Image (spheres, grey):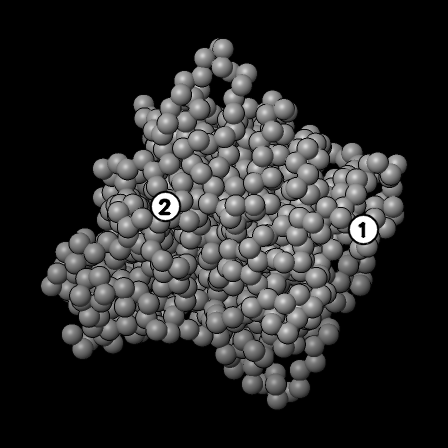
Amino acid sequence: MLAKNCPEAVLTYGELLMPKKQAFDISWKVGGEAGQGVLTTGFVIGKAFSLSGYNVFTAMENPSLIRGGHNTMQVRITDLEEFCLSPKTDILIALNRESLFLHADEIKKGGFIIYDSGKVELTPEERNSISKKAKIIGVPFTQICMENKYPAVMINTIAAGASIACTNLPMDFLDFAIEKNFQSKNKDSAIIESNKTAAKIGYQHVHDNYAEIVSEETLDVPQVYNDANAFFNGSEAFAIGALKAGCKFVAEYPMTPSTEFLTFMAAHEKDYDIVTKQTEDEISALGHVIGASYAGARAMTATSGGGFSLMVEYLGLAGMTEVPCVIINAQRPGPSTGLPTWTEQGDLRFAIHASQGEFPRIVMAPGDLEDCFYLAGDAFNLADQLQSPVIVLFDKVLAESKQTIAPQLLDESKIVIDRGKLITEEGEKTTAFYARYALTEDGISPRPLPGSNYVFSQASDEHDELGKFEEGLVNRKKMMEKRMQKLETIAKELPAPKYYGDKKAKLVIVGFGSTKTPILETLEKAEREGKKVGYIQIVYLNPFPTKQLKKMLEGKKLMVVESNYTGQLESLIRENCLIEADANFRKYDGRPIDAFELSDAVFKVLKKL
Amino acid sequence: MAKQKGVAQKITKETATSIDFDTPERKPDWCPGCGDFGIMRALKDALFELKIPRQETVLVAGIGCGSKLPQWINTNGFHTLHGRAMPVAQGIKLANPELTVVGVAGDGDTYGIGVGHFIHACRRNIDITLIAENNQVYGLTKGQTSPTSQKDYKSNSTPFGAIDRPINPLMLALSSDATFVARTFSGNMAHAKEIFKKAIQHKGFALVDVFQPCITYNKINTYSYFNQKTYDLQKTGHDTTNLEAAVAKSLEEEKLPIGIFYQKEEASYEDQLPKTNKLPIVKHDISKIKVQKLIDYYC
């Protein structure tokens, strides 16, 4: 494989040899019980592709339990830069009987099902029916484990190796990925070696027993000529950006799908010199964050909808006392406990309006890994500048799905620190209180830190410029206007929504958050079919980009795509821009939107225009 | 750059040693005779005698009559939410352990809505002091029963008498492994001052439960009630290192001991943080952090 940074002479020669970039779309799916290593297998396959420079998107499905149940992980590779999951699969690795039957209908023509022939009995009728859908490859995983004295969990590695044999990929394709996976879990070299061997045993079994398939009918995986990609999820990308932005304090209460922010940050307490705290509940988490931020540390918390509900009162405290804080809400389907391990975008309005009364806040939503990394820097800067909460909306897909990104796209030098009107000097000693809430033209007061010579009061009651309780009507008006002015001031600094696709497109899709990848993939499909569709990604939902969006939608037909029932983004557009959507696509079954169902819907709308 | 407002009085070398924690331009709006006046005076004197600079002190309050106290002490004050002073106080201390952090909240705040945070603050042992202004009633909302009101206490929310048995704050603190548990009485300001001083000096979480009369609403737990019933624990030769003795004292009801019930020396939470840089995180330079190695790890 040619590296991107080859010397020029070789590259020129190589360019002549390099095949044209070809379109491909290949998916693995691993299915099994929790505890069988479904996610590990999927990770190893995805990592192997990422290391070889492929663009990978993975999607997990897991019920809310620790053992048993039905889990899947899809690993999809395509030639596109940005894409999401696929409703179809090329190779199904069924680690248990249930998975075989649950997903047989998803297999594309010419696809494979790999199953444990030693443990799962198929009746002639079952075998017959399934062979019509896919090529059945039986490998006696459990038996092989026993023969080689491997622990039962290693059936997943044997199965992964067997799946490689169904393609044109080399036998050692999984080696590095296996090493990386087990190194990160601090396993010793003996375990790494036995896993590598197990994968090859699975591979060899297919070669020995399915010779015709191996010679004639393997899945052709095209070669790519890229350096290794970075392979991680939105939680990790945001956390890394946050560390770069100087986040020094994380307090959190575990809640799916936000827990990984906490575990990632906790793992880096020492090497990044930060304080992390798992608190007794979500209320305490945001309280700790507000305290740490007041004292001068850049502080954040993460949670999901239920935890965010608990944080609502403290949210108002931060708004009223003008303390910066960054809060991630990694959304999942509600209401109430809902579907803990599934996905939705149902908290948009909630994030914008939560807490009693009115105060300024920013609500932002990253759409992919690149967004997560850079928006982390923006979140902390905006929180410091606005001196108020910044709420970052994630969802399960963005938080948990490992995907690839070219590492050079993550340029840490682009994350700069701007702490707004933070007072860094010591000041002179006096007996006076400092006017923490001094009235200014832009609404933002200079912010001192406790410990300096500026002694100041902060109060959750309405207060005057000195932070003293004050109920008078003149003061109240001034303070409301001051706080709300801050948002107007900051709104001017926010970038406009980004437009993707053909500028001449008549139909424009508007979305927020992780719908970015299915929408971009849909745009790609449209282009390949000669159809014109545009996409506007709304990153900042509060303050809403009314003026800019109105201009961008002039003369266009609007289709709003979101994963909720009531069309919350659609209603925001109607309310702010006075624009009625011409069409919408709303998914609320807990599953992520994929580009196949979306493009079907979009093309139908195009036809009608 | 920053403009200073308010009644400014420059501190010179001559006046530096007599910094007063009073706020002459702000007058408390408590009812005349309220126990909070005694608590405030004792706290001001304690801070002054300990020579803790007012710039390095933060008072964190909840909501209620007593929680207004930071407004009338000339030091940093953060007035938060009902029952929610402890998480904020702990966050402040973890971010900057060089600050002296004192929580001030009433009995409803601390032992009712905030009792969860209270228990975890005890076991966490972050070096902060909590002064619980315990007047056994909800004053600011006009007289309802509180978690520490006696059984059968009559109020506008329990006109037929409170059915709940009261919380025992000291025993709750002891069973939550608090490393400093004390009680005092707002009517005995000299005693309160000494207890506050010892609590603030204690390395770790320190609870001072303060009996205080609410002269407007609580007609049972009055000044004369406390004058008759309270006695100085330290004058009885009580062993503050003995947990069982402390528990026994906390259960006394005929007479109400005041003083230090229990104290033990243990490393504070923040002293055990897995940090390499010893400076408080608020003093770290965040302009040169490098994360390339983290990105590379995922390649």
Task: Find numbered disc 1 in the image and state the secondary structure of the residue it sits on.
Answer: loop
Q: Residue at x 61, y 70 (%)?
A: B158
The residue lying at 69 percent from left, 73 percent from top is: A117
Residue B189 image position (x, y, % from top left)? 66, 36
C-alpha distance separating marks 2 and 1:
42 Å
Q: Position of residue B99 (x, y in %)?
A: 57, 30
Q: Is residue B127 left or right of residue B281?
A: right
Q: Residue at x 54, y 75 (%)?
A: A103
- The amino acid marked with disc number 1 is Lys
Q: Nearer the viewer, residue B13 or B227?
A: B227
User: Is residue B102 visible in the rendered structure shown here?
Assistant: yes
Residue corresponding to mark 1: B255
Splitting the image into 4 quarters, where does residue A116 fall?
bottom right
As rendered, which of B125 and B202 lies closer to the eye? Answer: B202
* Marked residue chain, label 1: B
Q: Marks 1 and 2: in contact by CB < 8 Å?
A: no
Q: Is residue A486 shown above or below B221?
A: above
**Quadrant (top left, top right, bottom left, bottom right) of the C terminus of chain A:** bottom left
Crowding at dot 2, Cα within 10 Å, few <14 / some 14-19 / many 20+, comes out as: some
Left or right: residue B40 versus residue A327 is right
Residue that sits furthest to the bottom in the current view = A125
Chain for disc number 2: A
Nearer the observer, disc 2 or disc 1?
1
- In the rendered image, residue A351, in percent from the top left (x then y), is placed at 39, 59
Q: Which residue is mark 2?
A: A470
Above or below for A152 versus B87: below
Q: Which mark is residue A398?
A: none
